[in-house]
Image: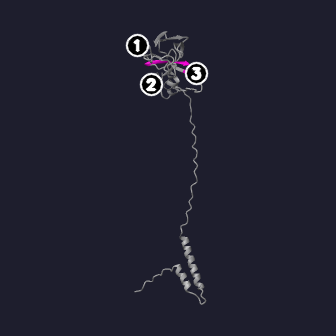
Amino acid sequence: MARRKTTKPAKPVTQYVEEINATETGKGKPSFGLLLSILMLMGLIIGAVYLTRTSPVAVTLPATQVAKPEPVLQVAVKEFVGAGACKECHQAEFKTWHGSDHDLAMQEANAQTMLGDFDNAKFKHDNVESTFFKRDGKFMVRTDGPDGKLTDYPITYTFGVNPLQQYLIEFPGGRYQALSIAWDSRPNTEGGQRWFHLYPQEKMDHTDQLHWTGRYQNWNMECAECHSTNLKKGYDAATDS
């Protein structure tokens, strides 16, 4: 049976160096051929080690992306057009809304909108007697003003229709004040058709903030948001007007 040939392992470099030192010529110097062979072998080993190293992978960073500005959308802004413009496309809704409490929440004072008795009707509350009358086609009230004196005031707007109607009076500085005396618009059989005070149990004079000429009865502050459409208050803090 033939013997299998085995490959001898390569000698380490240090062993080759030892052999160089042990093998000398007659003059005590190493053989030139052997020295050259060892140098070539060392070069091959060094080259193999160098080639087996993992080359660094170049990482390319993505360029910084600059966010593009979003396009500005042009929004069409239209002015208030009134209920008539809605009627064209929403006739059923308009019919339901027309004449409702919401529709009649605030109206100009005229013969069609005023429900109260302005035939020199008198009403007394807390020692102040107020009179409701007409003058030159205007609906008027004589009552205590911000100084406590009886003064004649034209009514500018009405508030509501059922079960009561309140009245708004214009004051200097662009103010509108809500009169605390209101008209009960219910039928007589239900106790209506009369003037009454919104604070029947309270006594207040012109110095009270709840007096109809005070800030707490101001249209801009208390009434405008719920009783008005296309609201533009226009209040100026510097002039308080």
Quadrant in which the N terminus is drawn: bottom left
- Which residues, given as a range, are shown in magenta? 162-175
Q: Quadrant of residue 32?
A: bottom right
Q: Which residue is mark 2?
A: 96
Helix, strand or loop for disc 3: helix
Q: Which residue is mark 1?
A: 188
List the single residue furthest toward the front: 207
Compared with residue 28, is residue 101 higher up or lower down, i.e. above or below? above
Q: Residue at horizontal 53%, vertical 79%? A: 14
* 163 magenta-colored: yes
Instruction: Find the distance from the CA under tag 1 to the CA under tag 2.
Output: 27 Å
First in sequence, mark 1 or 2: give its number: 2
Q: Residue at horizontal 56%, vertical 81%? A: 38
Amino acid type, callout 3: Gly
List the single residue furthest toward the bottom: 26
> Which is more toward the observer, 9 or 214?
214
Disc 2 and disc 3 in contact, CB within 8 angstroms: no
Q: Which residue is mark 3?
A: 173
First in sequence, mark 3 or 1: give its number: 3
Helix, strand or loop for disc 1: helix
> Which is more toward the observer, 158 or 176?
176
